[in-house]
Amino acid sequence: MPIPANHPQRFQLANEVHARPYASIHIPARASHIAILLNTKQRQEDREALGALCERYLVPPPPPEADHFNGDFGSFQLRWELHTEFSTYTFYTTGDCSDPFAETALRSVPDAWLESLPGQVIAAIHAGMICKDKDNKERQPIDLDAISPLFEGNTLIGSEVAGGVASALTDFRIHADGFSRLLVIDHGIFSSRQAGRLLQRLFEIEVYRMMALLAYPMARKMLPELNERDQRLLDITMAMSKNGDPSALLDKLTTLATEVEYSRSSSHFRLFMDRRLTPAMNTCRSVNKRQNTLSKRISQTGQLLRTRVDITLERQNQSLLESMDRRARLQLRLQETVEGLSVAAITYYLVSLVGYLAKAAKTAGMPVKPELVIGISIPVVAGALILGVRWIRKKVEKAQAKIDEPPA
């Protein structure tokens, strides 16, 4: 069809919906699921380990940028996914499942390769999927006494799943081999895709349960720190009310804000689940809420402290301006005094010159009395000098006013 050009990522985005299809599992089957926490360096090592396994079994490895992979290795099938903090390996085998936890799917995987995997295991599960009531029209109750030995006699927790077409049982224990155990019982109407989807979801619930609980010890550890920081903020606020040194208080508040922000950035909480995790998750949420509240209070206190610092600076500036104004007035008075002395001195010299001229004229035979001429010239010269000084001062003041005038 003559439609506009496709967006460069249109097909990639459309295919993302189907990028990670669920495995197709034919019951009876066994599965082993391992979730491994990885740091930045170990993510690349994890890809290299997967590539080594593919090379060993002559299976084409995933491309370098892939974050999921499904492969058939003959004796087992493998599903690999790379997440933000961890990667998961799920191994599947089909066939006899009379004792799924004795002969696990992981038995087909080389031990040396398993030992070479980087990171730390956060969840490990062996699962068995068996079919019950396939040939019976009526659904029979599950015989827990027959199933209990598979879990070493531990208390079982179970539920109907997938709308009642299957049941899932576990004991939430980590057994001697380091794996939890999960048993899925198909009541005879499961498709292979349904089985794969259900098992994948059950694995993910266990992994995210563990990932969510990673925040719980951190939250318990942070509670005393929050109490101590809360008290420090109260001390700073009290010191502000008593007119403490703003600079010292601002340093303390900045240090406290830095500690709280570091704590917030290093304690991102993961996906949370309810039910049995509710008490632990409530603790985590409470700590997270207190951190956010404390951060806001520090910000508000900082604004108040900055306001006080600004007011203090304004008062200092005002005092400085008043001091400068006083100095200017003193300089003006001193200048006026100097001007008066200058007028007197200049008048004296000018009158002396007039006296010398009058004496010279008298010597030349002119009818002039020098004393009289000097007496008359004093007020004339002094008045002229005073007027001249005032005129010069006005000129200077006008020029200064033009300089101080703000630009348009």
Image (cartoon, rainbow, N blue to C red):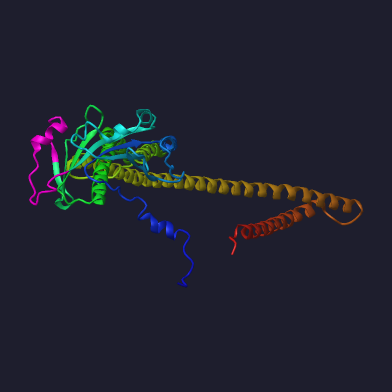
Asked if one can make out residue 137 in the rendered structure from this viewpoint, the answer is: yes
Where does residue 115 sit, x and y in percent of width and height? 36, 28
Residue 155 in sight from this viewpoint: no
Q: Is residue 229 above or below residue 333?
A: above
Q: Position of residue 140 (x, y in %)?
A: 7, 46
Which residue is found at the position 50% from the left and 47% from the top? 322
Indicate yes or no whether the magenta region holds residue 10: no
Q: Is residue 143 magenta?
A: yes
In the image, 108 versus 183, the foreground residue is 108
**Which part of the image, by quadrant, shows the N terminus?**
bottom left
**What kind of secondary structure does the magenta stretch mostly adopt?**
loop
Q: Is residue 364 left or right of residue 134?
A: right
Q: Residue at x 69, y 55 (%)?
A: 389
The spot of residue 248 in percent (x, y) is: 41, 35
Residue extending furthest toward the bottom: 2
Q: Nearer the viewer, residue 109 or 392?
A: 109
Residue appearing at x 15%, y 29% in the figure: 152
Quarter location, residue 408: bottom right
Count of residue discs: 0
What is the span of residues highlighted in magenta in the rendered image?
Answer: 131-157
Q: Position of residue 262 (x, y in %)?
A: 38, 38
Between 286 and 110, the residue placed more toward the observer is 110
